[in-house]
Image (cartoon, rainbow, N blue to C red):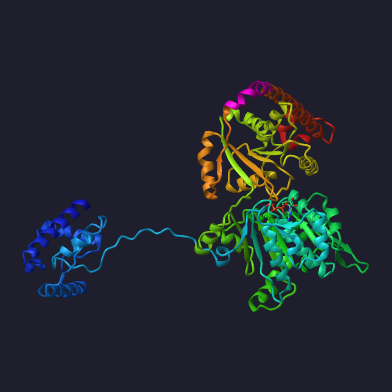
Amino acid sequence: MYSTAENRILARSQARKNKKKLQNGDLENTDDTRPISKKSRSDAKALEEENGVNLESQETSPKKKKKKKAKQELETNDENHLPVEIPEDEVLENTEPENTETEKKDEPAGTGFTILEEFRANKNNKVFRVLPTWLAKPSVISCDLSKNKVPISEISGLDRFLIEALKRNKIEHFFPVQQQVIPWLLESQQQLFRPCDMCVSAPTGSGKTLAFVLPTVQALWRHSVRQLRCLAVLPVHDLAVQVYRVYSSFCADTNLQVALISGQASFYEEQQLLVRKSKTGQYLTKPDIVVCTPGRLVDHLQRTPGFSLKSLRYLIIDEADRIMEEEHNDWLFHAEKAIGVSSGHLIAQKLSVPLEKSVQKLLFSATLSQDPEKLTRLGLFQPKLFTSVVSTTDAADNTKQSHHFVGKFTTPAELTEHYFKCPPMLKPLAVYCLLKKFKYRTTICFTNSLAATHRLCELLKQFGDLKVAECSSKISKGPRDKLLKDFSSGKIDLLVCTDAVSRGMDLGVVDCVISYDSPKYVKNYIHRAGRAARAGRPGTAITILVDSEMHGFHKLLGMAEKKNVTPLDMQTDEFEVYEEQFRKALDGLKNTVKEEIQSKIVRNHQARQKKGFKLKSKKGNVVSTKLAKHRGKSVTK
Ligand SMILES: Nc1ncnc2c1ncn2[C@@H]1O[C@H](COP(=O)(O)OP(=O)(O)OP(=O)(O)O)[C@@H](O)[C@H]1O
């Protein structure tokens, strides 16, 4: 057996011999009957199979007949002294460079074999996903809020009361997303047929909330009937509260009613907000607009009599990608069932029948999923996409490349982004040094866990000159609301938190966002960083990285196609001045942790005692918890 390389050499030398013979005018020897050693025959055959090139003639096959004909033509060509090109190297060794022109010209007519078909190595072309047209060709929104503002008077179609409300809220200009989305929505309300659904992907803090609040309030106000016509769904309570406040503010001069159902109030209280009974015993809807979390919505759809979505006109899904990632009791299925999408709407969709009651879905996010499958699940009707790009060049590219979704992960143009490499032991000191060096007044510091949040907060408190607080899902709704309010009003310098408050929260002026632990996903990074540089104000995002995190972080940035994250101008030598303070703070933390462990032990002990007390038998025998554990429930008999 010969190796492939040897086969090639043998075949090549055979070809060369043939060439020489041809040059000597020995065309006859190029015939199939020419003496070829047994070995080279078998080698050539192997090569033939390998390359798909026929080196020997087989008279019986139709291929051979064709080849014979070609050979006859070859001979005729030779007789007529026509040059015949036989790029043998190309045929035998496809990895070699192509023959030069001169070589081809010098080649004599005829060789011992006929080329049936030129062999070309197929390059494996990269396969791109073909995006649906609406995703591939979006309307582009600028990320630069400070340069692209237009006075509110320039957007026509908004009612007087809304202009007044804007002025009351000190809003004089519209941001790019508002300039595009508000007129589009206002216009879609005028249409006779079912309006198209809308997806908006614009940077954090770019004013997406107002972009849907203003047109929906105007539409509901113009056709005033007390029915639930607008439903805004948000992933968590904190965000629902935020949107509820914006709706309430812009409905203040109207008779429109807004309700919040996010689990803050008791279920019964929320039911009272949603429905009332008429004198005839019929259920009547109380609010025109409901702001809710998905889980609570499903609860009310299932357990609140008279709560109906039959009159709904707008279904707003804010932070849409997050809502779609989490199933939330299959909320969309329940909502669509309550709306009654399955029958009437599909017919309307097919026949384009004017349908007053059709529901327009409006999706908003800073990191909207470009996964068509996920978006298909929403059953969007002829959707229109508005997305942001960093530069106009990106926008131009986007029109050319239909596989490339440019607006996926953009950050505000006013955001300055850095990373800082630091040994793990010095990370807390790095946070302190950052605040001191750059004199940030309001800072949010994100960690990856509840434990890290608590420890870091306690340690930084020990420095003594910072107003530090921690915020996580461990803190209940009431105190958390107060905490966030205090931070927004500047009563707290540094808020150490988990990703529970990374998305959508508008916490006033935030100078800097520090990622104490490297974010796990690119979306986390975008949302964390987006707590700063909101509404066109400047802000900074700094990610602290230990050596082992560097690669992962840069990979993350690569996924977001972010090239503007630079190393921070700070050295670990600068920490020296704070070393003594740091040592004391660490000692202080040790004591705090000891105290916490002690109090936890006491609490657990008390809880166990309480439990033991409850395990009193019917006969009045008190059984110790330890004993109870051993015996299980049967101890009480
Ligand atoms: N035209 C405007 N002029 C001035 N401030 C504005 C304007 N529009 C919105 N804002 C303010 O900008 C801030 C951010 O707005 P909003 O919360 O709607 O951003 P967002 O795009 O939803 O951000 P995120 O994606 O993080 O949720 C809010 O404080 C809001 O009051």
Relative depth, front residue between 11 and 596: 11
User: Residue at horizontal 13%, vertical 56%?
Assistant: 13
User: Quick check: 288 left or right of 197?
Assistant: right
Q: Position of residue 55 (x, y in %)?
A: 17, 64
Magenta-colored span: 573-584
User: Residue at horizontal 67%, vertical 46%?
Assistant: 533
Residue 179 appears in view: yes
User: Quick check: 148 left or right of 125?
Assistant: right
Residue 338 appears in view: no
Against 451, residue 412 (above or below) is below
Q: Position of residue 600 (x, y in %)?
A: 74, 28
User: Residue at horizontal 15%, vertical 68%?
Assistant: 57
Relative depth, front residue between 530 and 234: 530
Residue 329, located in which quarter of the rendered image? bottom right
579 in the magenta segment: yes
Against 145, residue 285 (above or below) is below
Against 139, residue 4 (above or below) is above
Residue 81, located in which quarter of the rendered image? bottom left
User: Quick check: 68 left or right of 302?
Assistant: left
Against 619, residue 253 (above or below) is below
498 in the magenta segment: no
Residue 540, located in which quarter of the rendered image? top right
